[in-house]
Amino acid sequence: MINSVRWRYHVEGIVQGVGFRPFIYTLCLRFHLKGYVLNNSEGVIIDIEGFENSLNQFEEALHVELPPLARIDLITKDKKLPLQNYTEFTISKSDVSTSKHTLISPDMALCPACLEELKNPNNRRFGYPFINCTHCGPRYSIIKTVPYDRPNTSMHPFVMCHACEQEYTNPLDRRYHAQPISCEACGPTLSLKNIQGDVLATHEKALEIFARFIREGHIVAMKGMGGFHLMCDATCDMTVLELRKRKHRPSKPFAVMFGSLDDVKKECQMQVSEENELCSQLRPIVLLKRHEMLSRISIYIAPRIDRLGAFLPYTPLHVRLFDYLQTPIVATSANRSGEPIITHSDELLEKLDGVVDYYLDYNRDIVNASDDSVIQVIDDKILLMRASRGLAPKSLRFTSHETRKILAVGAQQKNAIAIYHNQQVILSPYIGDLDTVNSFEFFEKTLQSFKDFYDFEPDIIVGDMHPNYATTQWAKKQNKPFVQVQHHYAHILATLYEHRLDEKVLGIAWDGTGYGDDGTIWGGEFLVCDTTSYERVAHFEPFLLLGGDASIKDIRRILISLLFDIGFEHFDEMPFDTKDIKLLKQIYDKKINAPRCSSVGRLFDAVAVLCGLSHKVSYDGESGLLLESLYDNTISEAYSFYLEGTMIHYKHTLLDMIHDKEPRIIATKFMNALVDCVVELSAKYGLPTVLSGGVFQNRTLLENLLVKSKMPLYFPHEIPINDGGICMGQLYKMLSK
């Protein structure tokens, strides 16, 4: 080739399973370039030669025209001599001889092109509930190891028919090397079964009868992309109450899947940004404000609160289900309370016997479980509450001189793990609360998957300071260096990492619990900090948790403890049992099993009791959601919290709350007081203000802060704001040394 040059490109990022190689193929045909492209365990290799001008055009198009799910994190190129005099451009077989660096893609919702084919009677995949292409479908949930080729997935047992094989091997086809490719002739099969495991129907008939069971009021389960959903008619009070009874879930809200965007709009208020997220290919659960008018949705879906977790069908199977339904449905994770989502029918039969009447299964294994992602939209930006399907594994390139492989094991609640490997930070999908044996086994299984994906074996482990966290105890047994990072500092570090802030900030970390430097429970923290150190400059006045963890469930104990602190004596005028008061006073006086606590999350609990919440909370954040539903934005008054030294005093306002009586007034003035605290301390320190911790999932609190604060406020968008982001802060502490 006269005047030709040859370049070899090495591309890292999300470049496997997303149509990247056929994209390169079409570019090279367009620009008359010869050579080859192949996957390897580090990414993609492109070896091409042609005229220099053509290569320049290729490079420009490479960045501008990327496939929708692809992402380039790093691209290097080397000039190669001599020329190979390639005669054509080819897609070569994957090379698995190198170490594993390739990033694993999250599962993705059905793309518009596949949806159109699904609905088209003239298409050969019309109505096929497992339709997919390189732009959509399962990834993380079916992969065993890299490179992302069919033998390394749970699609390996399914032999492609001739028609699918032609698409799979045609570089110009949208399904070229789409590893889950299949059709009715060669793909997974639907089966409807009763709880004994007997097959009642298969294929289309199974789907039709399954939908009929939902309409008739049955509680059923369906295998989704990353696990089973429990489902029932969301408009039927009796059915929803029966699900609560069987699931032992008294009041925690259920997510609702709607058949269309118009159906969501009938129930919820939506801004354009919320609509965009709801309809995006991520298809998360979006927490929306409900209309005040009468609703079709059962009042027992989300009792006593004004928010609804809504989402749209995201797999072709979900889309097909709504062909037979006219009502929205409950679609919540199939699991025992506090345990991981169930992925196998054997486990479903064992653990949910007595909960589920029938279930819809298919014969493709789920290798890696993933739950539904949950977000809110605040100030047109995502507030991430659970990162899983569509969002995780999340990979973020981070250039560092650190050469060690690092594992961050996260927190006890809402656990996720993160690893650092080959200049990449990778966040796992949501794992959950590590309070049961099964949950911790899921933690270990997720870690093992990441080890398999990346040939990853940590050189160092980083975790929380709490001695009783399961992750802490596990890490201490690994015979590896173990670094511990204070919980609330890790919250702030995670936000510093996301926003790449390399300066002193005022970090405000509010949550339900976290082990403090002094051995007490923190959770209302103001930290002047950077990536190297922190100083606790303010915190809320501590109180005693009477009975320890018992106070977290029986939240009357928190209010009673606070009232003891101010010498309150008129308990006979309040709805408390005299015997309980006497017992708790003994615990209070003797300070036995009564740890000190400064948590804002627990203050929400105490105020919620004054606002009429029953003494038991059945899920994390219930108090905050109740106070949000009571908030009145026409009330500008606030209780008078004040700072003395490093202590924020608020207990004196309890008498004001009792005097105010009306829940709407109490909730509003309390949250306004919290906003005033942040604004006052932000002004005092004059530093960038960084917010993190589960309390800031409270949309009303955060929106009021954004309105009233005159200083920039930073909070996480790509990383969960709750304990799901702790692992990223732990990791960043090591990377910023």
Image (cartoon, rainbow, N blue to C red):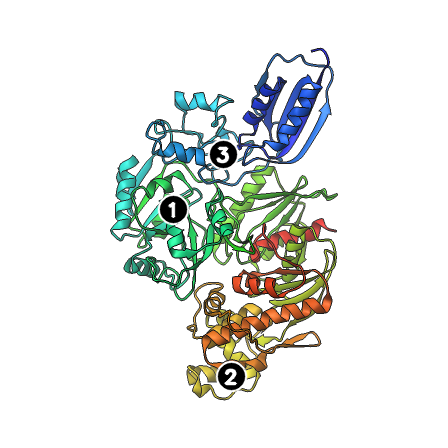
Q: Position of residue 496 (x, y in %)?
A: 67, 54
Using the image, determine if residue 416 lies above or below residue 251: above
Amino acid type at mark 3: His
Crowd rating for badge 2 (residues with CA inside 10 Å; few <14, some 14–19, many 20+) = some
Mark 3 to mark 2: distance in Å? 62 Å
Using the image, determine if residue 259 lies above or below residue 65: below
Q: Residue at x 63, y 71 (%)?
A: 677
Mark 2 to mark 1: distance in Å? 55 Å
Amino acid type at mark 2: Lys
Do we see residue 467 in this rendering?
no
Residue 585: image tag: 2
Q: Position of residue 426 (x, y in %)?
A: 60, 44
Amino acid type at mark 1: Ser
Q: Is residue 417 left or right of residue 517?
A: left
Q: Position of residue 87 (x, y in %)?
A: 61, 12
Residue 260: image tag: 1
Residue 685: image tag: none
Q: Nearer the viewer, mark 1 or mark 3?
A: 1
Mark 1 to mark 3: distance in Å? 21 Å
Nearest to the observer: residue 706 or residue 251? 706
Disc 3 target residue: 135
Do we see residue 349 in this rendering?
yes
Mark toward the start of the polypeptide (1 vs 3): 3
The kind of secondary structure element at disc 2 is helix
Nearest to the observer: residue 583 or residue 118? 118
